Image (cartoon, rainbow, N blue to C red):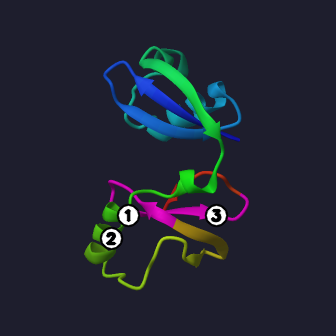
Amino acid sequence: MNTYLIEFIDGHKRQVIGETAGKAKYDLFRDLQDCFNCDFRDFIGFIESCKKLRGFSIKDLFGGRDQFESIKQARGIDFAYQGMRISVCGQMGIIVGGNNSMNLDVVFNGQYHKSPL
């Protein structure tokens, strides 16, 4: 696995984890499919560059601490912390952060990408 920085033509940037640059772009397309009303071929046209930053590191999964803390307060889960092991519907995982939808991001055992909770 590698960590890639994908930059869109409008200047927005996103870090994505993937085996190859192509797989990283496709994973991002799948994550953003609800925002784009197009197929993958058209989506590629919005990407200006895809640069390999480094080989995969576990720290790439962890999100911003400030956002995570505000989600904890808003949801009333002050006991939670990044790196906490949890079980969701029988699947074990680790809390790695939060997202703009006020959900926690969890990496489940055996996976290398975040899943919103």
Give percent across and percent down for residue 48: 44, 17
- Mark nearest the camera among 3 and 2 is 2
Marks 2 and 1: in contact by CB < 8 Å?
yes
Which residue lies most toward the bottom here?
Answer: 79
Other-residue count near label 2 (Cα within 10 Å), few / some / many at <14 / 14–19 / ≥20: some
In the picture of the structure, the residue carrying the numbered disc 2 is 69
In the image, 62 versus 105, the foreground residue is 62
In the picture of the structure, the residue carrying the numbered disc 1 is 65
Marks 3 and 1: in contact by CB < 8 Å?
no
Q: Could you tell me how far apart the alpha carbons at marks 1 and 2 are, in whole angstroms?
A: 6 Å
Residue 25 found in image quarter:
top right
Mark 3 or mark 2: name the one nearer the start of the chain.
Answer: 2
Is 59 rendered above or below residue 82?
Answer: above
Q: Could you tell me how far apart the alpha carbons at marks 3 and 2 are, in whole angstroms?
A: 21 Å
Give percent across and percent down for residue 38: 44, 22
In the picture of the structure, the residue carrying the numbered disc 3 is 108
Give percent across and percent down for residue 103: 39, 63
Residue 78 found in image quarter:
bottom left
Query: What's the residue type where badge 1 is placed?
Result: Arg
* Residue sitting at x 62%, y 37%: 54
Q: Secondary structure at mark 1?
A: helix
